[in-house]
Amino acid sequence: MGKTVLLETVWVLRSMYEFDDVSIAHAIEGAFGLPRVRVEDSDRVKLALTVVADRVHIADALHVATARCEARAFATFDQNLARRGKARLGPIEVL
């Protein structure tokens, strides 16, 4: 399962079925245990799912956790993301 598929799944479950992020994270975590399911960048996706407990939106957590670059920090305009996510996700800089 690609990260873009996960993001679309999050969007559908939230907007169409009114699931909250914690419920969505639990559902995705459950998919990890299925025998034929492979998740792209699974260790980083699992990290993103744990950050949902810190009230970080699941899509934001996926973006930060799976970003691969040599930058000194993930840049965002979202102050809540920076405050809540930096402990587990690493440096997040508010622009």
Image (tube, helix red, strand yellow):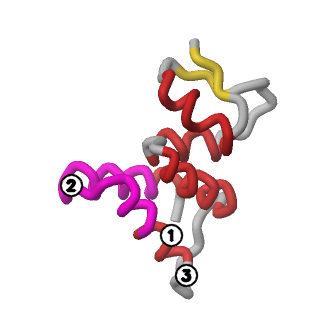
Q: Position of residue 78 (x, y in %)?
A: 48, 23
Say if 75 sits above or below 58 in the image.
above
For label 1, the crowd category at 10 Å Cα-Cα, with few meaning under 14, some 14 to 19 and many 20 or more, is some
User: Disc 2 to disc 3, how far (Cα)?
Assistant: 24 Å
Looking at the rendering, which quadrant does residue 76 occupy? Answer: top right
| Residue on which the image places disc 1 | 29
Say if 68 sits above or below 23 in the image.
above
Looking at the rendering, which quadrant does residue 61 occupy? Answer: top right
For label 2, the crowd category at 10 Å Cα-Cα, with few meaning under 14, some 14 to 19 and many 20 or more, is few
| Residue on which the image places disc 2 | 18
- Identify the main secondary structure in magenta: helix
| Residue on which the image places disc 3 | 33
Q: Earlier in the sequence, mark 2 or mark 3?
A: 2
Q: Which residues are magenta?
A: 5-26
Q: Earlier in the sequence, mark 1 or mark 2?
A: 2
Q: Amino acid at mark 1?
A: Glu
Q: Secondary structure at mark 3?
A: loop
Q: Secondary structure at mark 2?
A: loop
Q: Are marks 3 and 1 in contact (CB under 8 Å)?
A: yes
For label 3, the crowd category at 10 Å Cα-Cα, with few meaning under 14, some 14 to 19 and many 20 or more, is few
Q: Amino acid at mark 2?
A: Glu
Q: Residue at x 64, y 46 (%)?
A: 66
Q: Amino acid at mark 3?
A: Gly
Q: Residue at x 77, y 25 (%)?
A: 71
Q: Position of residue 37 (x, y in %)?
A: 54, 77
Q: Position of residue 9 (x, y in %)?
A: 36, 58
